[in-house]
Amino acid sequence: MIEELKEEQIVNKVGGRFKLSTLIQKRMVQLNRGGVRTPLENTANTQSLMETVIQEIMQDKIYLDTAGRLVVDGEVAPDDTGPVAGPTLDDLK
């Protein structure tokens, strides 16, 4: 198991377990889609994409904005017209 997930620090950093789950899911979907964005963390030190996402969270490189959208450090915060990082309603059908 990923050690950071055993600690409350990561839960408190993002504002709760549900927000943490949402943030991880949205970033994993974004990266698995072959995304426009590459992982921010050097993956040579990690064994999985999940560990990369956890490191991005711990280093404050990704977060959810007040509307629950994924924001990647160094990018302009998304507006209502941009693509969403998580699954669309069509993906859920």
Image (cartoon, rainbow, N blue to C red):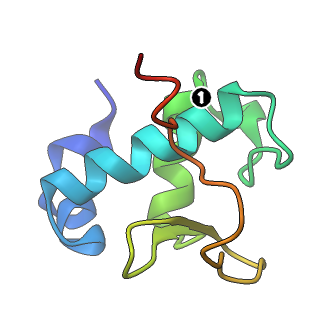
Q: Is residue 38 left or right of residue 66?
A: right
- Which of the two residues, 84 or 11, is positioned nearer the viewer here? 84
In the rendered image, residue 23, in percent from the top left (x then y), is placed at 40, 53
Q: Is residue 25 above or below residue 73?
A: above
- Which of the two residues, 76 or 61, is positioned nearer the viewer here? 76
> Residue at the location (45% across, 78% down)?
65
Q: Is residue 92 left or right of residue 59?
A: left
Q: How many marks?
A: 1
In the rendered image, residue 21, in percent from the top left (x then y), is placed at 28, 45
Q: Secondary structure at mark 1?
A: helix
> Residue at the location (52% across, 37% down)?
88
Q: Is residue 78 left or right of residue 89?
A: right
Image quarter in which the C terminus is found: top left
Q: Is residue 65 above or below residue 48?
A: below
> Residue at the location (57% across, 33% down)?
29
- Residue at the spot of label 1: 49
Q: Is residue 41 above or below residue 9?
A: above
Image quarter in which the N terminus is found: top left
Q: Amino acid at mark 1?
A: Leu
Q: Is residue 69 left or right of residue 30?
A: left
**Residue 62, located in which quarter of the rendered image?**
bottom right
In the rendered image, residue 36, in percent from the top left (x then y), is placed at 86, 46
Residue found farthest to the top: 93
Label 1 Cα crowd, 10 Å radius (few <14 / some 14-19 / many 20+) = some
